[in-house]
Structure formats: C-alpha cells, structure tokens
Image (cartoon, rainbow, N blue to C red):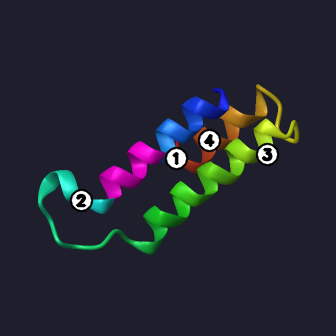
Amino acid sequence: MNKADAEAYASELRSLLSNRSHGLTETPSRAAIDIAEQLERFAALHDRGVLTDLEFPAQKAKLLGG
C-alpha cells in the first residue's frame, strides 16, 4: 500500500468513525480514533522506509485484527 492509499484508507476510517454518514450524534470511541492514528503512523513509517513493503500491510492487518 502506498502513501496515497494509506491516507485514503485513514480518511475513510475517520469518516466512518465520525458517524456523519449515518446521522448519528455519538462520538467515535477513543479506541477507534487510536486505530486511525496508528494507521497514519504506519503509513509515515512506510514512507520513510522504516517499514518495508511487506511489514506495512502485516502491521496494518495486526492492528485491524486480521
């Protein structure tokens, strides 16, 4: 996954968590926000070469429970 894909995924996750599309006023849980923030950190580490092309999706899957 490249930086643009990771940013798009994180943006979509934030959108889903905001519940705007569902018309709910409930705020997202801290755990859900932490997941989005961690995905952004993984993407940044991948962009800097700290995480390899194999490590990045593995870390993402582990974070998302997959």
Instruction: Look at the numbered discs 4 and 1 and tell me whether their residues touch, using CB distance below 8 Å.
Output: yes
Q: Position of residue 61 (x, y in %)?
A: 59, 39
- Which residue bears the numbered disc 2? 19
Measured in 3D between alpha carbons, the distance from the residue under mark 4 to the one under mark 2, in whole angstroms, is 22 Å
Quadrant in which the N terminus is drawn: top right
Instruction: Look at the numbered discs 4 and 2 and tell me whether their residues touch, using CB distance below 8 Å.
Output: no
Measured in 3D between alpha carbons, the distance from the residue under mark 4 to the one under mark 1, in whole angstroms, is 6 Å
- Which residue bears the numbered disc 3? 45
User: Element type at marker 4?
Assistant: helix
Residue 32 in the figure: left or right of residue 25: right
Taking depth in this image into account, of 3 and 34 the one nearest to the observer is 3
Q: Amino acid at mark 4?
A: Lys
User: Is residue 42 inside the magenta stretch?
Assistant: no
User: Element type at marker 1?
Assistant: loop
Q: Main secondary structure of the magenta part?
A: helix
Q: Amino acid at mark 1?
A: Leu
Tag nearer the camera, 4 or 3: 3
Q: Amino acid at mark 2?
A: Asn
Pointer 4 local density, CA inside 10 Å: few below 14, some 14–19, many at least 20: some
Measured in 3D between alpha carbons, the distance from the residue under mark 3 to the one under mark 1, in whole angstroms, is 17 Å
Q: Amino acid at mark 3?
A: Leu
Which residues make up the magenta segment? 11-17
Q: Quadrant of residue 12?
A: top left
**Is 39 drawn above or below residue 55 in the view shown?**
below
Measured in 3D between alpha carbons, the distance from the residue under mark 1 to the one under mark 2, in whole angstroms, is 19 Å
- All told, the count of numbered labels is 4
